[in-house]
């Protein structure tokens, strides 16, 4: 994946959404027009400039670039950069890292 021409700031994280292919139990692949829901999985492509604690101390991120994550469905903001869709979210909106 090419490095995006955008850098999040603060505790924000830039995520490339991962679209899941929808299949029925019998193996039929459903087109994108069926049940189009917001993605909840993505890959971290850039980290912000760090979070700050209440006392002003910089806190390192718990995720890193390349991590596959699960996040809250309606929390991210959608942005388009150079024709590619990305999501910008706070690290607090990440629910889990997929191993």
Image (tube, rainbow, N blue to C red):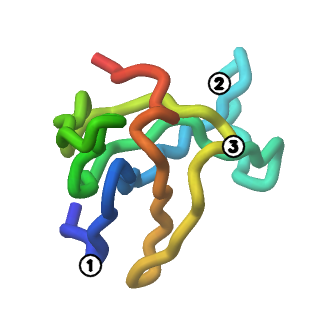
In this figure, which residue is indicated by the disc labeled 3?
74
Query: Sequence-wise, which precedes: disc 2 or disc 1?
Result: 1
- Pointer 2: what residue? 27
Q: In what quadrant of the picture does the C terminus appear? A: top left
Residue 8 lies, in percent from the top left, at 33, 63
Q: Say whether residue 79 is left or right of residue 81.
A: right
Report how far apart the C-alphas of labels 2 and 3 lie in the structure.
29 Å
Q: Which residue is mark 1?
A: 5
Left or right for 29, reference 12 = right
What residue is shown at x 53% (from left), y 70% (from top)? 79
- Mark 2 vs mark 3: in front: 3
Q: What secondary structure is found at the residue carrying circle 3?
A: loop
Looking at the image, residue 51 lies above or below residue 4: above
- x and y percentages locating residue 50 in the rendered image: 23, 48
Residue 57 lies left or right of residue 23; in this view the side is left
Depth check: give the residue in front, 4 or 24: 4
Query: What kind of element bears circle 2?
Result: loop
Image spot of residue 14 (x, y percent): 37, 56
């Amino acid at each position: 994946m090419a490095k995006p021409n955008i850098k999040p700031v603060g505790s924000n994280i830039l995520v490339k959404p991962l679209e899941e292919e929808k299949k029925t139990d019998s193996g039929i692949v459903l087109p994108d027009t069926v049940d189009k829901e917001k993605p909840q999985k993505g890959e971290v492509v850039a980290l912000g400039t760090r979070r700050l604690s209440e006392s002003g101390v910089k806190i390192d991120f718990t995720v890193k670039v390349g991590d596959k994550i699960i996040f809250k469905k309606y929390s991210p903001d959608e942005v388009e950069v150079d024709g590619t869709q990305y999501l910008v979210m706070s690290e607090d909106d990440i629910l889990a890292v997929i191993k």
